[in-house]
Amino acid sequence: MADPIHQFQIETIATLGKIGNVEIAFTNSALFMFIAVGLTMAFLVLATGSRALVPSRWQSLAEMTYEFVETTVKGSAGQEGMRFFPLIFSLFMFVLVTNFLGMIPGGFTVTSHIIVTFALAMLVFLAVIIVGVLGHGFHFLKLFVPSGVPGYILPLVVLIEVISFLSRPISLSVRLFANMLAGHIALKIFAGFVVSLGAAGVWAVLSPLPLALAVGLTALELLVAFLQAYVFTILTCIYLNDALHPGH
Amino acid sequence: MAKGSESGKTPSEMPPVQSTGISSSNQEAELARRMADLSDRLDTQTAKAGLAGGSIGATGSDSAGMGQGFKAAADLSGGVIVGVILGLGLDRIAGSSPWGLIVFLLLGFSAGVLNMLRGFGMAVPKGSGRPPRQD
């Protein structure tokens, strides 16, 4: 049967040079990141190029994307959150497009590598800390002190709150990565079943079963690809909201 | 890009013929009432969805259950992983092995459970003194 992990293999396309002992290479992962960014830019630039009052189909698709993210940002982080709209919109489009590119047969799923999702999550995490400290200074630490907790238990609660805060980038990245990885492996395994059952003589009559499952899983994976991009976005907004309004 | 559809749409976009004045104003009042009702219901739904935070697919289907499972797993493991990292780091610096690991593993587990409960809206939201939502 086809190796279900093989699809996540990083392959070097071109070597750009070396820094110390680390090879700097242009890989298939980087290629798909470039494709995702290129597609997003082409979509938005071409779709909004005409700026018609009565939008064409492409323009209204671009406007729908904008309004969808705008509603999410305003709903979770309030009007002040709109300052970070460019960051959040870029994150949403990048995760969404890379997730969808992974659904194309033969495509590479960038977000199925934890290093990529962790880098995105750390970007959000550091942005939250910088925004919080710049905006509120020492007051930002009130985030870790819940109100109405008795004094004798406060050190323990603060310690747990700090650990809970530090675990955010990990749970944010693990959630996206685990969903994409598990979904693609399941898809590959069921697709592999179709082939191996088909080659197994009499058992070939059963091969439509995993085929039907693979079709259903493909639809589910498309949903998950969108849902995870949305979840990543809304969690970013919730964390930014903490940075904008700590301890309220 | 949408040349054909726009020319084909025109008949349906024509204003409706004003047949009788009274019935059309009645209809408009009815329509306004229904739209206000709908927007009220949408507002309450949006507020609910905003509180739930990322559980838009919670319709009881398999995919929603899987999503919630992944969410809980990520929240819990996040706390435990951070606890282990902090504990091992403290042990290395202070040479207190294995006490740092033991204490921070327990604290990390508590933080993970707290994350998980918050993720499902069952614990007090961060920083606010409100009681937990009962749902």
Image: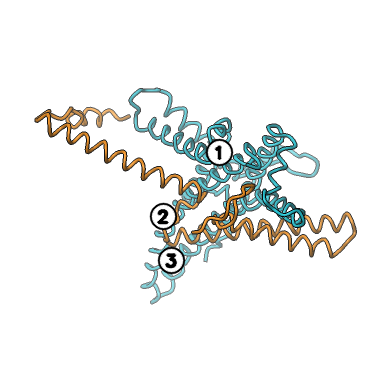
Say whether disc 2 or disc 1 marks the residue closer to the N-terminus. Answer: 1
Q: Which of A49 and A53 is in front in this view?
A: A53
Q: Which residue is drawn at 22% across and 38% down?
A: B30
**Residue A58 occupies quadrant:** top left
For the question of whether residue A181 can be seen, the reply is no
Horizontal side of B75 relative to A187 (left or right) equals right
The residue under label 1 is which amino acid type?
Answer: Ala
Q: Quadrant of the C terminus of chain A?
A: top right
Mark 3–mark 1 distance (CA, rounded to whole Å): 47 Å
Q: Which of B18 and A52 is in front in this view?
A: B18
Instruction: Check if mark 3's residue and mark 1's residue have beta carbons within 8 Å.
Output: no
Q: Given this view, does label 2 or label 1 mark the residue nearer the observer?
A: 1
Chain containing mark 1: A
Q: Mark 2 points at which residue?
A: A219
Color of chain B here? Answer: orange
Q: Name the element at disc 3.
A: helix
Q: Mark 1 points at which residue?
A: A77
The percent position of residue B103, horizontal first and vertical second, equals 79, 62
**Residue A16 occupies quadrant:** top right
Q: Which residue is drawn at 58% across and 34% down?
A: A87
Q: Name the residue under label 3.
A: A194
Q: Residue at x 41, y 47 (%)?
A: B45
The percent position of residue A189, horizontal first and vertical second, equals 50, 64
Mark 3–mark 2 distance (CA, rounded to whole Å): 18 Å
